[in-house]
């Protein structure tokens, strides 16, 4: 092709760069600019939607109006090419592709191109159009990936709410194999935020899922990739080292990532599995191993006297029965995550989150800044959510002190704190944890009370976190278990409004 004489290497270099980076406008613009310089013409590509998708800077767009009938014929397949003259410009038009509506390539110049030059321009123009389609395909793929992630996130959030039936309904026509599993484990991989999509895409199947698993970018923590791995009843021991958990363990072995793995749970108990994975991740973060499976004891609500606990929880939460559902949702999430994260998760402003928490605080008559009150509310919500039944029927309504009595509860608390006994500085850890809780998790205030540095307090918290197999530094459910264990063993007092 004459237009390429002596310039083939330069053209191939530019075209190759555009092909390698189809999403880059600059790379494709460089190819178009090169063609303009070789032919001394202006070039435009009219896309399938009828608008200019790509053009040289000097292309006379005012010429498009008189050309509309011809552009329509070319786009619909009535003709393959045409030559027109508009305002002293000679314009070559050529449809690109086979399926209508077809993109149309326009080459405009003051002189008529020789036959060989016109043929070369047509070939090179077709390549430009192909590169442009590659860019469109890449953009479409990105959109698809975003939508697929939204579907996976919706499924995860529905399972977190414990509604497996709704999860099936929202995925009608493409129900993931995970929803047919007997159990699941939640695995949380801590990795650089930019690598989460790369890992998820590498293991995504044609349905948009991950085999019997589900990988989701955490909507709260930017460095977390949440993975749900399905299991059957006959999996046997070692299931946390096969399949998706095994894959994630291999990723964690390169020591750039950390991994926390829950115990197997029913699909309806995904929220509990998620909390266990968070605790295990905290243990991995502070330990010698880069992957940790949850090793904790049964949860506190499992060992409480059932009826007494239910009556107490209903009494405590009864004022929320008339509150808007969003207020209750914000309260539940606000007990687990920082306010900015809650706002992000629900798509509302931080001020709105604060307003809902204030409304809940006033309705309940509790101080949500007090860790004892927060721990009690979170426990009550786990026992029975607001609006889950009529008010308690008993004449004598139990307080939290009565709920936290009994041998099973005492054994739970002692078992929870027992790992601290194996630590070489047991007294320091106990004292630091107690002061930190009573300071409402203010490490600086706890350090002042203990007459040590803030860094010393943090180091002890990390040691305690590893020993207790609980995530303490995020200030969420792990801390609430610690607060209840201290209440039960008499290390700290129950706030008067809850007694």
Image: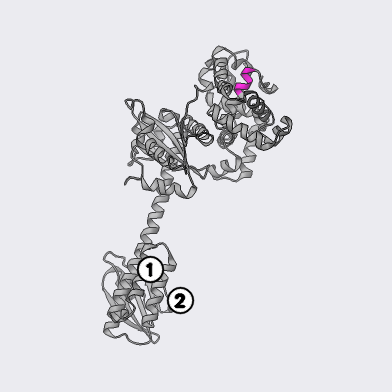
> Left or right of 311: which side holds 27?
left
Where does residue 81 sit, x and y in percent of width and height?
28, 76
Q: Secondary structure at mark 2?
A: loop
The residue nearer to you, when weighing 198 against 455, is 455
Colour pattern: one colour
In this rendering, the label closer to the viewer, 1 or 2: 2
Which residue does the numbered mark 2 point to in the structure image?
Answer: 57
Q: Is residue 385 visible?
A: no
> Left or right of 355: which side holds 138?
left
Residue at 45%, 76% in the rendered image: 57
Residue at 64%, 44% in the rendered image: 351
Q: Is residue 3 visible?
A: yes
What are the residue bounds of the magenta stretch? Answer: 484-489
The reply to whether discs 1 and 2 touch (Cβ–Cβ < 8 Å) is no
Residue 438 vertical placement versus 35 (above, below): above
Instruction: In the rendered structure, find residue 168 and report the number of the disc placed on it.
Output: none
Where does residue 64 sit, x and y in percent of width and height?
40, 76
Instruction: In the rendered structure, find residue 50 and report the number of the disc placed on it.
Output: 1
- Give the CA distance from mark 1 to mark 2: 19 Å
Q: Quadrant of the N terminus?
A: bottom left
């Amino acid at each position: 092709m004459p237009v390429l004489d002596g310039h083939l290497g330069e053209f191939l270099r530019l075209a190759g760069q555009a092909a390698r980076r189809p999403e880059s406008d600059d790379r494709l613009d460089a190819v178009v600019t090169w063609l303009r310089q070789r032919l001394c013409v202006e070039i435009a590509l009219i896309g399938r939607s009828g608008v200019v998708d790509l053009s040289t800077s000097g292309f006379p767009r005012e010429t498009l109006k008189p050309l509309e009938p011809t552009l329509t014929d070319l786009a619909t397949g009535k003709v393959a090419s045409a030559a027109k003259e508009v305002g002293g410009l000679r314009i070559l038009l050529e449809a690109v592709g086979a399926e209508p509506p077809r993109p149309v390539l326009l080459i405009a110049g003051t002189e008529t191109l020789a036959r060989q030059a016109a043929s070369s321009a047509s070939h090179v123009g077709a390549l430009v159009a192909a590169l442009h389609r590659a860019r469109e395909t890449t953009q479409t793929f990105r959109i698809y990936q975003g939508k697929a992630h939204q579907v996976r996130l919706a499924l995860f959030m529905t399972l977190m709410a414990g509604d497996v039936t709704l999860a099936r309904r929202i995925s009608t026509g493409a129900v993931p194999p995970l929803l047919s599993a007997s159990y699941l484990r939640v695995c949380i991989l801590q990795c650089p935020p930019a690598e989460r999509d790369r890992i998820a895409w590498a293991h995504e199947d044609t349905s948009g899922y991950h085999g019997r698993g589900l990988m989701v970018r955490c909507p709260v923590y930017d460095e977390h990739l949440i993975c749900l791995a399905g299991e059957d009843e006959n999996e046997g021991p070692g299931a946390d080292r096969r399949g998706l958990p095994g894959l994630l363990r291999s990723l964690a072995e390169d020591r750039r990532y950390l991994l926390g793995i829950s115990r197997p749970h029913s699909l309806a108990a995904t929220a509990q599995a998620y909390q266990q994975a968070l605790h295990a991740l905290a243990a991995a973060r502070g330990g010698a191993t880069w992957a940790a499976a949850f090793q904790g004891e049964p949860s506190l609500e499992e060992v409480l006297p059932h009826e007494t606990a239910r009556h107490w929880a209903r009494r405590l939460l009864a004022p929320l029965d008339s509150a808007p559902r969003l207020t209750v949702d914000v309260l539940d999430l606000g007990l687990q995550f920082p306010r900015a994260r809650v706002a992000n998760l629900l798509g509302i402003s931080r001020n709105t989150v604060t307003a809902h928490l204030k409304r809940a605080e006033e309705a309940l008559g509790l101080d949500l800044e007090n860790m004892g009150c927060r721990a009690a509310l979170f426990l009550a919500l786990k026992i029975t959510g607001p609006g889950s039944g009529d008010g308690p029927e008993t004449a004598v309504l139990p307080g939290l002190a009565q709920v936290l009595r009994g041998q099973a509860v005492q054994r739970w608390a002692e078992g929870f704190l027992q790992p601290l006994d194996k630590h070489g500085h047991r007294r320091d850890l106990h004292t630091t944890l107690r002061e930190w809780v009573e300071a409402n998790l203010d490490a600086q205030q706890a350090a002042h009370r203990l007459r040590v540095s803030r860094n010393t307090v943090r180091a002890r918290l990390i040691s305690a976190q590893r020993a207790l197999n609980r995530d303490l530094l995020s200030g969420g459910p792990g801390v609430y278990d610690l607060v209840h264990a201290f209440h039960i063993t008499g290390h700290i007092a129950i706030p008067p409004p809850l007694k």
